[in-house]
Amino acid sequence: MKSIIFIESNTSGTGEIFIKKAIEYKYKPILLTMNSNLYSFSNKILDLKIVDGIDTLNEQEIVNFCKTYIAGGNVISGITSSSEYYIEIAAKIAKIFGLAGPKPEAVPRCRNKYLQYKTLVNHNLDLPKTQIISKESDILNGLKSMQFPVVIKPVEGTGSVGVRLCYNIDQCCSLVEQLLTHKKNERGIEVDNRVLLEEYIPGDEYSGEVFDGELIGITKKYLSTPPFFIERGHEFPAILDHKHYSQIKREISRAIKALGLEWGACHVEFRLFEDRVYFIEVNPRLAGGYIPEIVKLSTGIDLIDNQLKKALNMTVNIKRNKNINIGLRFLIPAHEGVLLNFSNMFQADGIIEVKQYKTEGLHFLPRGDFRDRVGHIIFNMDVISAEEIEQSISSIKIIKE
């Protein structure tokens, strides 16, 4: 039987979906992991082979496993990862075995936001002014060319963790001091702990969902109140006039080519301000959260399915067969408290899905990033408006003080 190797995985959501889809296509999924306890779904999938305790940061150890597996008469048809932290090593090893994958040199160039910044600036694309901070004393020099407020963020990271809008020097120093102490991420992987100081660009925020270098569509993003940048809602497709859509499509194409990301899925975050497209960051992966799901509901294009097919060198299908306006709103408590059961409280025509991530009775403590989202509502905007959904959310209590 043909197999596909997954080097680690997302702990929920798309990670489980990738594995189940591989089984549907008659491939044996093999999950290489340092700790299978991270994956609550792993024991539920009977056809999943788990190789536990392997050092998934050690390229040679993974190569040795693959060679031994092949020597045993098995066929490896793909090597990939659904986790952003492991797509780089997966790309390297796929190339070693002559399998499909993104350019190995392109992935680290994107995951390190400062390398990405320099690449895009060198190709004359618009970005916020950016300075690299290695120590607190660098802040004053960095601020000389900027005005408050400014954005502070880790060089490496995801999910808006550690990203803040700062309004004065004290806020900058406090956050930078904190971020510089972070030597490893939540997976225990060593990271570049330097910090980026960025000019703040006002304006509406969007993301371009790209596949094989082609723009599938644009997502409108709704963010939380500053100083945090939690994504509290999405709408797909974003409503834009022809001029701006064409401009965005052109600039995204330039950025993708500059970074070498023409293979598979790519998620491009940007702001539109004064008729210019300012790139916030380009991710060499599928969009996080539920953006792939609302794209599928809107267009019929299954980005997760196509990403798996790319890894298996199968024919992809990015032809649109629907045209529905889809919205999503996350439920984010405004304060600390005990979570109530709200999963059955939202009922109206046009609501497609209500999902609660955390069970009733759990204590909620705001962190200022994606972990504050305790549930979501997906809805058909052709049937029910975003305003009605917002009103419904505000009227239902989800936290007991």
Image: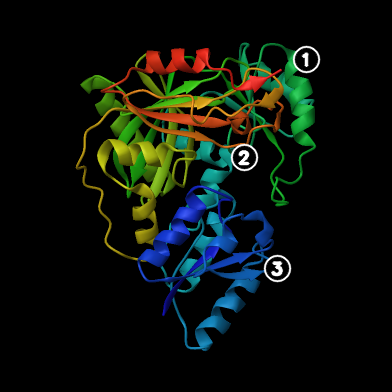
Q: Which residue is mark 3?
A: 53
The image's mark for residue 115 is none
User: Is residue 173 placed above or below 57 in the rendered structure?
Assistant: above
Relative to residue 232, is residue 299 drawn left or right?
left
Describe the element under mark 2 as helix, strand or loop. loop
Q: Which residue is mark 1?
A: 170
For disc 3, the neighbor class at 10 Å (few under 14, some 14 to 19, many from 20) is few
Q: Quadrant of the C terminus?
A: top right
Q: How far across and how far down the image is residue 250, in percent?
A: 29, 33
Which residue is rendered at x = 50% and y = 83% of the image?
70
Q: Which residue is mark 2?
A: 157
Q: How far across and how far down the image is residue 20, in percent?
A: 44, 60
Of the numbered discs 3 and 1, the one sitting upstream in the chain is 3
Q: Distance from label 2 to label 1 (Cα)?
A: 23 Å
Of the numbered discs 2 and 1, the one sitting upstream in the chain is 2
Which of discs 2 and 1 lies nearer the camera? The answer is 2
Pick whichever, 215 or 278, lies toward us. 215
Q: Quadrant of the N terminus?
A: bottom left
Of the numbered discs 2 and 3, the one sitting upstream in the chain is 3
Q: How far across and how far down the image is residue 4, in percent?
A: 46, 69
User: Is residue 335 placed above or below 216 in the rendered structure?
Assistant: above
Q: Could you tell me the amino acid type at mark 2?
A: Gly
